[in-house]
Image: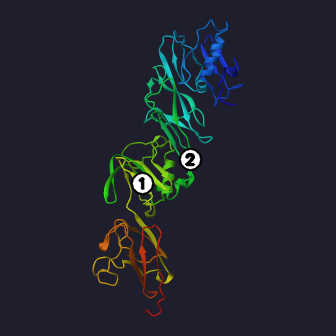
Amino acid sequence: MAKITSKASLNVDTEIVIDEPGRTIRLVEAGNLVAKDGVTLQAVYSKLVDLWATASYQDSPFPMYAIDALSGQYAIGTDGATYSAWTWYDDTTRNMLRDGGWSEYNGSSAIVQQFAGFIGLGTINSGAQPYYHLASTDSPTNFPFTDQFNAGIKVYGDASHGNFDKRTYAKAFCREYGKKYASSVLADTGATATGANKQNFLIANSDDLKIAAADGAMSGAPYSGITVSYYTANQTRSIGGVSRNFKIIIEGNGGTLEQIYTKVQYLLRQATNINASGDAGSKIGKIQSDLLTFVGDTLVTAQSVYIDNILAADSNRVEFYDDSNTKRVNPYTAAGTISFNAPLVGAGSSYRLFFTSPPGASNDYGEAGAITVNDAGGTPIAGTIGASSIAFTYDYDGNVQGGYGGGTDRPVTLVGIRPGYGKFVAATGTLTRSKTIALSLVAEVDRVYA
């Protein structure tokens, strides 16, 4: 079956039931009508026109008024001049109406309810459950059916029908595991309010290739420690030595950018509070704005979002947008690995990385003023050799030790020793603008030390 668009597919007492004494119109899932596919308001209106052209129905006032099919504006309970209190039989019937919105009038010419026709434009995956809310603080409400939506949503009710008026805001969402998230507000198509007409929402999704794990993995490492906190006041973070302001802080917990993104997307599908430790109150995940987006392999944050504790190797493929919505990027952090052979690994060992020949005087390797290279955090690259490989970082753009200018390659000399096991050894290399710098030390076994 498909959406009914023709009055010819509506048969009295099969798909449509008209109760003249009770003044109700009922749609029934039978014959040509499938509830999920529904029927257009235009088809229902046209069917009623044909019926009221016969003597059988002319003793009752006409139930509907059609203002414009293109914009989807209809009314029930009035013929445009008089008011009769005709209405839809129930919400099951209302949920089958497509391609329009409508007002419901009582016999005294007052609007008692109003429904806007929310229509999703675009393609979403089969089985997706889109949802919406009518105020930024409202809980999410599922559309009546799965897949792309086209349904009448109640936006106004008088004192006898909910006593609310939510015609100034609406946002629709589609967030499915393994798919890129989609959301759309009224302004996306130029609308400023809802009402008894059609409202389009730009909703489409596609495969998300950056999701790194299934939902079941979120309780394990590193995902369990990746959280989001929302704050009312600015939180400062240093980027390139300058303090910047952010109000949403993601704890990255040392995960890759893909792992951080995966957990954040998971949180944004939850119907519970996801505010881990911020002071901005409860934040229901499903209705919060998107926080992160991948552009190629670069992770881009939404406005005022910062990520703590990301891997050094990932520091230069993330773009932060601060509270003023200005892009901020980390200075380039080079990264690499120092490898050691077995005689150098263990207790009593030590290694140190020197600049080979900085511009200043008397500070070359081999001279009394030899300068130890600092890592990106300002800590000397030196210590005990506790493993066959040790990762390191280097502030390629910002390190000016020994008179170097930032942003240039630097020759280095690496030394290491382990008394009684590995002889003293030195090797040279170069620190470049790379995340895969490789330095190594291979020492002879020391069979003489005693």
Q: Secondary structure at mark 2?
A: loop
Q: Amino acid at mark 2?
A: Lys
Position above or below: 322 against 66? below
Percent x, y of residue 418: 43, 84
Q: Amino acid at mark 1?
A: Glu
10 Å crowding of disc 2: few (<14), some (14-19), many (20+): many
Q: Nearer the viewer, residue 332 or 275?
A: 332
Q: Which residue is under mark 1?
A: 319
Percent x, y of residue 302: 42, 47
Position above or below: 81 against 343? above
Position above or below: 448 against 426? below
Q: Nearer the viewer, residue 170 or 329?
A: 329
Q: Residue 94 is drawn in which quadrant?
A: top right
Percent x, y of residue 301: 43, 50
Which corner quadrant holds the N terminus?
top right
10 Å crowding of disc 1: few (<14), some (14-19), many (20+): many
Q: Residue 34 is drawn in which quadrant?
A: top right
**Which residue corresponds to the image point at 58% horizontal and 32% vertical from the top-left?**
144
Horizontal side of 13 relative to 221 (left or right) equals: right
Q: Between marks 2 and 1, how big is the CA–CA gap?
A: 22 Å
Horizontal side of 164 relative to 405 (left or right) equals: right
Q: Mark yes or no: residue 63 visible.
A: yes
Q: Earlier in the sequence, mark 2 or mark 1?
A: 2
Which corner quadrant holds the C terminus?
bottom left
Q: Which residue is under mark 2?
A: 179
Q: Secondary structure at mark 1?
A: strand
Q: Give the residue furthest to the left.
A: 361
**Which residue corresponds to the image point at 30% horizontal and 80% vertical from the top-left?**
363
Q: Nearer the viewer, residue 19 or 379?
A: 379
Q: Give the residue furthest to the right.
A: 31
